[in-house]
Image (cartoon, grey):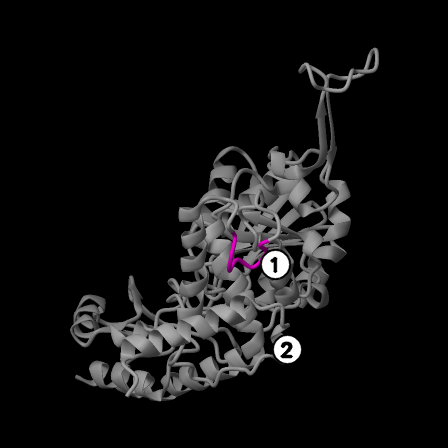
């Protein structure tokens, strides 16, 4: 009989092969949903909280373990890494991870830059647009991320015209957004899926209206990308950012920034500067440098004409790019539409069964994201009950947020319901 340790080791090796194999995801055999074999979270708790941070898969763990093995050997022996040819390229899977993310949201890799987090990406967008700008306003809403609301209220306190659209009935009404956006609006900043209750914006409708007024649209994709289909081309989004530790199944410290390609030329002064932004760099000051042409600068460089050339800065956590090279391939092998269908079947059951137990649903019925939220009468007691049952959800203020993922099944939903009944 195969032991559990052997099974996990075998699963990890097979998953790692998928992570480093040149075979495209489209010809790999898709895992079966729910995928209980590639995750271990269910061995420790009933994890219904992937919207907080997603448990690491066996395959992603194997990919990062092989990177750490390489880090112990030195730079020359790159056996087992995704791109082993160049020993000076420590982050061999960086470009693959970027390309896979671009495919996930229907963008070009040239439109994608690595950033530290979703919030870092949003801040870079604001800086690149020279905000605050006199005479221009910013529109956002009360279901956007709280860190973003802090950013925009800081700008408001500095004198910027910031318009906060208030929710009604746990929704943002399109008519309220339309009234707030005018010909002086520079940026509309929203979350595709609200982290608070899973409210889903109609991105195309918002982009169409904003563009008709001359405004640009930034979208926080952190609770959407990887969990449901996202198409930045079809929707018309101008900027978007996404961390990797949630539905992209990566880890903390790395994310992606999307910038529509035709906007790059309009960003006159990039907000940051680093060695990751140039395609050529020459100095004329050291003994072995080529001599400078009389009157020419002593430092010459050519900026890469893409998102990386405007926004990337500093070193990257290469262990996470190895993780993402596996996880993004895994997500696309499963298919985001299948992932969404699976999560909707689980959240749909909660939508039906929890309100009669005294937990009103505060996620609009027309929302199709991976989160569902319920009102609580006694958050502290609910938290204590679920902790005792080892059921992991997010409880904050007077709300409970449930976010199942690919590894969850009906038995996990049963455990949550039974714990709440008790």
x, y percentage for residue 208? Answer: 72, 62
Residue 156 is a magenta residue: no
Of labels 1 and 2, earlier in sequence is: 2
Asked whether 416 or 247 is in front, the reply is 247
User: Position of 36 compared to 279: left or right?
Assistant: left
User: Position of 392 compared to 174: left or right?
Assistant: left
Is any part of residue 404 visible from this angle? no
User: Position of 130 compared to 243: left or right?
Assistant: right
Is any part of residue 250 visible from this angle? yes
Q: Which residues are magenta?
A: 78-84
- Residue 96: which numbered mark, if any? 1
Toward which corner of the image does residue 46 lie, by quadrant? bottom left
User: Position of 248 compared to 45: left or right?
Assistant: right
Label 1 with label 2: CB-CB less than 8 Å: no
Specify the farthest residue to the right.
Answer: 294
| Element at label 1 | helix
Q: Which residue is mark 2?
A: 26
Q: Main secondary structure of the magenta part?
A: loop
Residue 80 is a magenta residue: yes
């Amino acid at each position: 009989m195969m032991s559990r340790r052997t099974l996990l080791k075998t699963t990890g090796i097979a998953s790692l092969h998928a992570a480093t194999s040149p075979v495209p995801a489209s010809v790999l055999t898709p895992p079966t949903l729910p995928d209980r074999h590639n995750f271990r979270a269910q061995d420790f708790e009933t994890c219904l909280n992937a919207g907080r941070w997603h448990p690491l898969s066996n395959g992603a763990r194997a990919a990062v373990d092989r990177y750490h093995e390489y880090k112990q050997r030195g730079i020359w022996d790159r056996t087992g890494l995704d791109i082993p040819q160049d020993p000076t390229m420590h982050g061999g899977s960086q470009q693959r991870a970027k390309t896979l993310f671009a495919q996930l949201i229907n963008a070009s890799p040239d439109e994608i830059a690595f950033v530290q987090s979703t919030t870092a990406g949003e801040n870079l967008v604001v800086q690149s647009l020279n905000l605050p700008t006199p005479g221009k306003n910013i529109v956002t809403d009360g279901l956007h991320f709280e860190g973003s609301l802090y950013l925009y209220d800081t700008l408001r306190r500095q004198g910027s015209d910031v318009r906060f659209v208030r929710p009604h009935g746990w929704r943002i009404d399109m008519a309220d957004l339309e009234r707030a956006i005018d010909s002086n609006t520079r940026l509309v900043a929203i979350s595709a899926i609200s982290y608070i209750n899973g409210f889903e914006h109609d991105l195309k409708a918002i982009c169409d209206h904003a563009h008709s007024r001359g405004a640009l649209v930034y979208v926080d994709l952190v609770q959407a990308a990887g969990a449901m289909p996202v198409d930045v081309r079809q929707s018309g989004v101008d900027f978007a950012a996404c961390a990797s530790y949630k539905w992209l199944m990566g880890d903390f410290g790395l994310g992606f920034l999307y910038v529509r390609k035709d906007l790059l030329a309009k960003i006159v002064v990039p907000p940051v500067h680093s060695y990751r932004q140039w395609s050529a760099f020459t100095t004329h000051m050291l003994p072995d440098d080529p001599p400078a042409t009389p009157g020419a600068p002593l430092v010459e460089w050519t900026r890469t004409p893409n998102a990386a050339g405007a926004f990337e800065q500093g070193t990257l956590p290469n262990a996470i790019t190895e993780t993402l090279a596996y996880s993004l391939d895994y997500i696309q092998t499963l298919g985001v539409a299948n992932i969404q269908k699976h999560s909707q079947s689980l959240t749909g059951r909660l939508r039906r069964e929890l309100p009669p137990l005294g937990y009103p649903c505060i996620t609009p019925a027309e929302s199709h994201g991976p989160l569902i939220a319920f009102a609580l009468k006694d958050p502290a007691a609910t938290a204590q009950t679920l902790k005792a049952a080892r059921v992991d959800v997010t409880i904050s203020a007077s709300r409970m947020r449930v976010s199942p993922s690919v590894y969850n099944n009906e038995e996990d939903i049963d455990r949550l319901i039974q714990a709440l009944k008790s």
